[in-house]
Amino acid sequence: MPNLGFGLTAGGVPALRIAFDNATDLVNESASNVGKFKFDSLNGTKLSYVYDIGEKGSYDSRYASGGGWNTNYWFFTGQGDWESPYTATNIGTTSKALIIWLTSGTGTQTKYVYKEWFPFGYMPIMEWRLIDPALAANTYTGPIINYSAFATSNGYVESFSGQRSLTAAHIDSNLYGSSGTREAYTQQVKSSSPNTTSRYLTSVFQLPARDDAMPDYSAAPSSGQQVLLLNPTTARLALPGRDVTDANPDHYIFHEDKIPAKIMAAGDVNVAASGTANIACPLPITAFTYMDFMIRRQTDTEFWNPPYFDSIASDKSLQFTYLVDVANQRITITNLKATAVTIRYIIFADSEQAPTTGGKKVLYKGNDGTRDFVQIKRPGSSDPAPNLNDIIVDTRLAYVPILAQGFLSWTSDFPTVVTSPNQFKGERMATVNVTNPSPKLKLFVKQGVVFDTRTTPTACRWGYHKVFTDASGWTGRCSADSTWAMVHSDESAVDFYMAGGNPQTANNAGGTTYNQYWDGSNHQSTALGLRYYIIGIPSSL
């Protein structure tokens, strides 16, 4: 039976802990030994960092031809809501989201998501994955190293990991006045030429995308606090200094009314040149499942985010697709290049199913035919067949701690100046060392460049890198919205590269454009810095 425990540890600190070894002392084992635990809330680990997965970024035919305020503006006042538009007056400065329909041609529809759309008080990481009609159902594009614009007058090579996460200042004098802006995730979901609509699977991480501090919802403990409550209607373990009567679900390690998306699996998998590989998931998956990843060629020793290329003169493309195979409870990766690769992956899954009923157990022990497991479930949910929206904790799932996170200011926190011929990586580099004792965790990195919120065309961009290829003096150097992260092969540190003062575009006639912020007129904008999260994947998963 898995070694799971929850309650008070040494020193009276409440915790949820799952150890790989049944001999591990859950009460007294030091939290610094991160590799011994599948989950340990003493390290600040959450059950999942993904708040929500759903098709929240797709074209919506309800808002397509007039009817909005000033004909073509639909405001939304509810968090996470596209169902209840407000159109009576202009509330552009206070609405939580916006849809604009432009009537030229066959019409265009664009969605704008402000930080107020989320219940966090900060702009979180939101990722958009195209549901490509050219691919089979539930199939997604993996890494993209794009050489298609290599030989154009504004030539470049770009790299990203199959998703888009980009904010920009929305400038619209109808909404915000002549000098106002609002930062938003902005996505056109219908174009006029060609006349196409788009669908996106979106995921939201409960992590700041900008330089906001990571919220700490714990408090100073006081006598008389009850931290644990399990009964037929309640399943709660409070954070230090909190009580089970607290009304805020964020103040808990787990809570029956806050059931996050699941991490189905995490680890490394080898995929042969032009080959396939399967990753089995321990629980049934849904159409709201996707794979986050880093990738390296098997001839390389380091993982990079986004995918690495070392040449703008020859094609170093990497490409695969992956199928979310709901029926067979697995992810199938198909390598589309004759290059053997290793993929470091985290598989996230969510569900829009209604909660099940009829059960009596909150703490459930079982065997799935392969192994024993323990679950903490939503009170009242089915005992033999709960769904993903019922399961709070399951020892078969993967849990990954954040080993390091922070904000690196440009340029003061980037001490290493990069020189030719390596400026395709960035103009400066910073190294973040990670405490990672044996048994070491595998490092997984997410990072983004951050500009002033008033900046266009980029205020914040995650997991993107672009190198100019035919740009006069800028050839072989990268754009201002580029970042690269390289994991050291011994899993001890990460190198971060940036070029926060470079142009946004450059052409072969020597012309450049830069990011600009708007306050009634345009001003050149230099990056504020880089936000990063370094996640640890246990080797035993």
Image (spheres, helix red, strand yellow):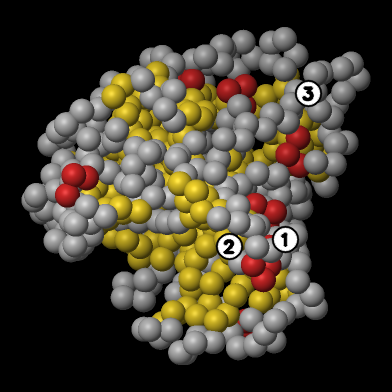
* Residue at image coords 40%, 18%: 433
Q: Quadrant of the N terminus?
A: top right
Q: Nearer the viewer, mark 3 or mark 2?
A: 2
**What residue do we see at 70% from left, 81% from top?**
70
- Of callouts 3 and 2, the N-terminal one: 2
Give the percent coordinates (x, y) of residue 502. Answer: 34, 42
Amino acid bearing label 3? Ala
Mark 1 and mark 2 lie on one chain; the one further toward the N terminus is 1
| Spot occupied by residue 403 in the image (x, y as percentages of width and height) | 48, 25
Q: Which residue is mark 1?
A: 93
Question: Residue 251, relative to residue 184: is it above or below?
Answer: above
- Give the Cα distance between marks 1 and 3: 34 Å
Q: Amino acid at mark 2?
A: Ile
Q: Could you tell me if residue 16 is visible in this image?
A: yes
Q: Say which label, 1 or 3, has the lower sequence index.
A: 1
Q: Which residue is mark 2?
A: 171
Q: Residue at x 80, y 18 (%)?
A: 220
Q: List x then y, in percent, for residue 273.
A: 12, 51
Quarter containing the C terminus: top left
Q: Residues within 10 Å of mark 3 (few under 14, many from 20)?
A: few
Within-10-Å neighbours for mark 2: few <14, some 14–19, many 20+: many
**Residue shown at 19%/62% (left/top)?**
153
Q: Is 500 on the left or on the right of 178, as rendered?
A: left
Q: Amino acid at mark 1?
A: Thr
**Marker disc for residue 219:** 3
Q: Give left or right: position of 72 versus 425.
A: right
Left of 541 or right of it: where is 467? Answer: left
* Gap in angstroms between the C-alphas marked 3 and 2: 40 Å
Q: Residue furthest front?
A: 521
Q: CA distance from mark 1 to mark 2?
A: 11 Å
Q: Secondary structure at mark 3?
A: loop
Q: Quick one: SS at disc 1?
A: loop
